[in-house]
Amino acid sequence: MKKLLPVICLLFAASESGAQLLINGAWKQIDNQSVAETVCIIEDNYFMQTNYDKSTKRFNGTMGGACVLNGDGRLKVTIEFNTMDQGEIGNNYDVNYKMENGNLVIDVEGHTSTWQRIDDGSGPLAGNWRITEREQNGEMTAMRPGPRKTLKILSGTRFQWAAINPETKEFFGTGGGTYTFNNGKYTETIEFFSRDSSRVGMSLSFDGQVEGTKWHHSGKSSKGDRISEIWTRQTP
């Protein structure tokens, strides 16, 4: 369980009336003594969290999965990927939490971690998205549904994608950082990349349009390859 302490910031809070309010957005751990930073994004009952060092372009590890509120007021977390401990994949955990001085305090079996809000998760792209179509030979082709999937989670200012297979416990890669989305132009700045650290610091711009639950995304990848994709929002 200690490996989960810097990871489980799956965010629900209770109002004074007792009503349950989901807190989406991006959070940064503030009681971490390491030079590396730990950032978590939560949207649509899903989270992704990564530890990395921008100054050295070092990617240290990531994990993510589903999060729901139990009837007893605690958080139920189901791990779908974990590069630090593959054995955690598929495990479920109940997590206690509280808000204190505007920060989120997570308590796992008496061990606590404190998180500061980066943004409140508002914006047209905020959500958990899965790639469902990709252009091939000049035509958009639907991707066959299956256990292997590529997800991209966005808060109001931050993004992370991850290619995973929860059934086989395989992890294929991840990247993330900050983004802007203005006037149909999506621009992301990479802060970590598990496959190639030389891409950290790059800014990439794409044409983007949201139509209902579909996000049309086109431009050039970090390799310079032309891409045209459709991502579908994964509703809770």
Image (cartoon, grey):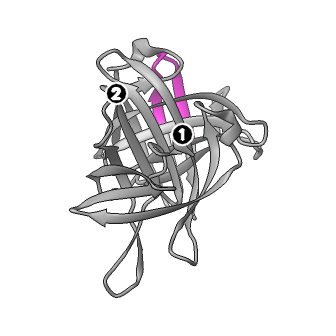
**Earlier-in-chain disc, 2 versus 1:** 1
**Is residue 173 at all visible to an observer of this figure?**
yes
Q: Which is closer to the viewer, label 2 or label 1?
A: 1
Instruction: Specify start and end residues of the magenta stretch as a single range.
Output: 218-229
Q: Which mark is residue 215?
A: none
Picture coordinates of residue 181, whole percent (x, y) = 31, 44
Q: Quadrant of residue 138?
A: top right
Placement of 227 over or under 92, stated as above or below: above
Q: Helix or strand or loop: what does disc 1 sit on?
A: helix
Q: Amino acid type of disc 1?
A: Lys
Q: In this view of the protein, which residue sits in the foreground, 28 or 150?
A: 28
Quarter of image, res 177: top left
Mark 2 packing: few (<14 Cα in 10 Å), some, or many (20+)? some
* Residue 7 drawn above or below residue 176: below
Q: Nearer the viewer, residue 102 or 139?
A: 102
Q: Residue at x 41, y 45 (%)?
A: 40
Is 224 within the magenta?
yes
Residue extending furthest toward the front: 110
Was residue 100 drawn as part of the magenta stretch in this picture? no
Q: Residue at x 77, y 45 (%)?
A: 146
Disc 2 versus disc 1: distance between alpha carbons?
16 Å
Q: Amino acid at mark 2?
A: Ala
- The x, y position of residue 11, in whole percent, is 43, 61
Q: Quadrant of the rendered structure where residue 150 is? A: top right
Q: Residue 36 got which mark?
A: 2
Tag 1 residue: 3
Marks 2 & 1, CB-CB < 8 Å contact: no
